[in-house]
Image: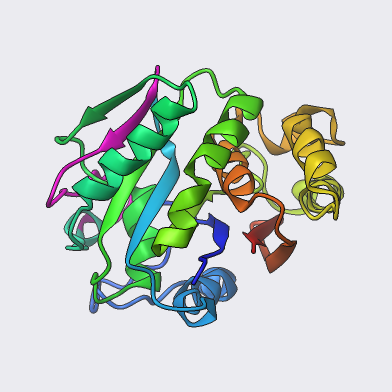
């Protein structure tokens, strides 16, 4: 059965695992609870359990699209200033080197030069949301980098190239945040973030797939775009998910608010 593609919010740092008395169980501040519940319910919404996951995180950029081919990746604790127990978290899912190589082949056939590496650990854009969604760590996962130029059209095209994986039992996930301006929070963020979120959602859920892709690629023209994303690395995983979603229906499947930010998740069927 064809898998959808998803753009998910991955929270802030280890936000779902802040209880030192039980660090392996999600136990977040009430502010993060709706997002935690959304992530925990993802697998139940799928047409069948994925054979593997291909995940693009806003925390890995390379000059060319790069796949992680490791069989047992470690974790990269790329967040700062959190309690000591959050640097000993574990998520021991197997890597998916065959899937990584298949993804690289599809990208190269579409004209994208690719690289591969096997040493980098999974960053927190991978293991934090997946530890909530898949606490048993029992689905193989391969990570794909962003391209450092952050070209939205290139990332949408890369997603299109990867779309055949959906019919091979692979769930494609873009992991980022629809609003990512860490310098503003609280009341000053509420109105502009909601205006931005409404405009982004209208573009993402446009019923015409070609127009949808054009509107999302032109995200910087939307109201409050650079307020929402001073730098767009957390938005680019959405481009990959949208491209891989093809001509299917696009829906908003998470509507949340944290620190005054309107935060959304999207699904492409």
Start-end of magenta stretch: 63-84
x, y percent for residue 30: 55, 76
x, y percent for residue 203: 82, 46
Q: Residue at x 54, y 40 (%)?
A: 159
Q: Nearer the viewer, residue 107 or 18?
A: 107
Q: Nearer the viewer, residue 266 or 233?
A: 266
Viewport quadrant of the C terminus = bottom right
x, y percent for residue 23: 25, 72
Q: Residue at x 16, y 48 (%)?
A: 73
x, y percent for residue 246: 65, 49
Q: Residue at x 16, y 36 (%)?
A: 118
Q: Is residue 65 magenta?
A: yes
Q: Nearer the viewer, residue 164 or 79?
A: 164
Quarter occupied by residue 69: top left
Q: Residue at x 22, y 48 (%)?
A: 98
Q: Nearer the viewer, residue 4 or 2?
A: 2
Q: Is residue 14 above or below residue 181?
A: below
- The rendered magenta stretch, by its main secondary structure, is classed as loop
Q: How is the image coloured?
A: rainbow
Quarter occupied by residue 210: top right
Q: Is residue 116 left or right of residue 259?
A: left
Q: Is residue 11 above or below residue 42?
A: above
Q: Is residue 226 magenta?
A: no
Q: Is residue 78 visible?
A: no
| Tally of numbered tags | 0
Q: Is residue 4 above or below residue 175?
A: below
């Amino acid at each position: 059965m064809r898998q959808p593609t998803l753009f998910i919010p991955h929270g802030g740092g280890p936000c779902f695992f802040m209880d030192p008395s039980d660090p392996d169980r999600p136990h977040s501040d009430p502010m993060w609870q709706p997002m935690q519940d959304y992530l925990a319910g993802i697998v139940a919404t799928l047409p069948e359990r994925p054979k593997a996951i291909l995940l693009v995180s806003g925390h890995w950029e390379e000059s060319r699209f790069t796949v992680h081919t490791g069989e047992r990746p470690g974790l990269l604790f790329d967040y700062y200033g959190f309690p000591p127990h959050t640097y000993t978290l574990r998520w021991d899912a197997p890597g998916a080197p065959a899937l990584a190589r298949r993804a690289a082949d599809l990208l190269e056939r579409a004209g994208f030069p690719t690289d591969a590496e096997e040493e980098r650990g999974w960053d927190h854009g991978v293991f934090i949301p997946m530890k909530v969604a898949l606490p048993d760590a029992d689905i193989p996962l391969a990570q794909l980098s962003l391209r450092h130029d952050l070209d939205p059209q290139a990332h949408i095209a890369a997603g299109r190239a990867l779309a055949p994986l959906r019919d091979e039992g692979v769930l494609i996930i873009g992991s980022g945040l629809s609003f990512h301006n860490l310098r503003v929070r609280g009341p000053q963020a509420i109105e502009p973030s909601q205006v931005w979120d409404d405009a982004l959602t209208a573009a993402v859920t446009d019923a015409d797939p070609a127009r949808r892709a054009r509107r999302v690629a032109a995200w910087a023209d939307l109201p409050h775009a650079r307020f929402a994303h001073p730098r767009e690395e957390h938005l680019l995983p959405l481009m990959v998910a949208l491209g891989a979603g093809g001509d299917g229906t696009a829906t908003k499947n998470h509507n949340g608010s944290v620190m005054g930010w309107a935060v959304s998740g999207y699904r492409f069927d």
